[in-house]
Amino acid sequence: MEHAGYGQYVVNNINSLPYGVPIYTEDIANNLAKQFHLDIGKAKGLVNVNLNRIAQKLDLERFQKGIYFKAKVTPFGKTKLNPAYITQNAYLLKNEESIGYETGATFMNQIGLTTQMAKYRYIVTNVFNRNGCKIDDKLHVVIRKPYTFVTNENYKYLQILDAVENKEKVPVDANEPNKVILEYIKSCKLDIIKLLAYASKYYGKETLRHLGEIAACELQ
């Protein structure tokens, strides 16, 4: 027999969340299992049953399997879920630990190396599990395998080294690209010795040579 509090607990969980953010059925199931000391399989079943019952009352919209969001009704229709939230949770950050970073033309545009706007966001991530590139059309991202396991400590180093490596692949229209990169290195307070070490260990000779040219800008 279903506990009378299960459905209300799911409702309270959802009501505590803001509009327009992803609601993961797995997270609600984990919370339900902890609250009522349930087997996780049973908790998932209860969440699925209750969500089907209460979705309409709570203005819940399904984004994709296992992901919902609260849609606010406006004069222009119901609000949508920003896919950037899903991208961050899926590929960039897990339990406040970096598991990936943005790369390619989108990152190079962010730091002022290029005005080119890419169709997809390019992301290097630990959750990538096969060679080559994988396109997530739902989120408009292309994910790539990292050279090494991404952490809070190293992701900015790997990110800027990718930009150095991509200088020959992405049209760069900054007047002084080496100085743009150097300023970014300074603004992030990256250790140049660590940067050289990562370049030497994980990147090719051309990247290491370009990094030396960038470092030399400091002497000009």
Image (cartoon, rainbow, N blue to C red):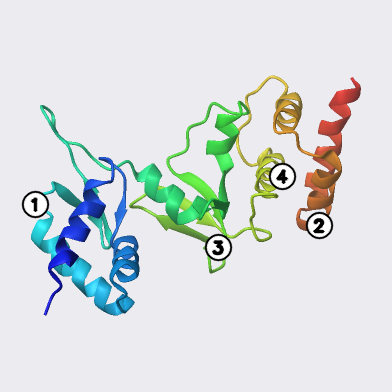
Q: Which residue is mark 3?
A: 132
Q: How far from the left and from the top, in percent, is residue 32?
A: 28, 66
Circles 3 and 1: CB atoms closer than 8 Å: no
102 left or right, relative to 202:
left
The amino acid beneath tag 3 is Gly
Q: Badge 1: few (under 14), some or many (20 or more) residues near its Cα, within 10 Å?
A: few
Q: How far from the left and from the top, in percent, is residue 73?
A: 13, 35
73 left or right, relative to 44:
left
Q: Badge 3: few (under 14), some or many (20 or more) residues near its Cα, within 10 Å?
A: few
Q: How far from the left and from the top, in percent, is residue 138?
A: 33, 52
Question: Element under label 4?
Answer: helix
Q: CA distance from mark 2 to mark 4?
A: 12 Å
Q: Which dot, 3 or 2, sits closer to the camera?
A: 2
Q: Badge 2: few (under 14), some or many (20 or more) residues near its Cα, within 10 Å?
A: few
Q: Which mark is residue 31?
A: none
* Image quadrant occupied by the C terminus: top right
Circles 3 and 2: CB atoms closer than 8 Å: no
Q: CA distance from mark 3 to mark 4?
A: 22 Å
Q: Which dot, 2 or 1, sits closer to the camera?
A: 1
Q: Which dot, 3 or 1, sits closer to the camera?
A: 1
Residue at image location 48% in from the left, 54% down from the top:
91
Q: Which image quadrant for residue 13?
A: bottom left
The amino acid beneath tag 4 is Tyr
Q: Earlier in the sequence, mark 1 or mark 4?
A: 1
Residue at image location 88% in from the left, 29% down from the top:
216
Q: CA distance from mark 2 to mark 1?
A: 54 Å
Residue at image location 69% in from the left, 49% down from the top:
153
Q: Which residue is mark 2?
A: 201
Q: Which residue is mark 1?
A: 56
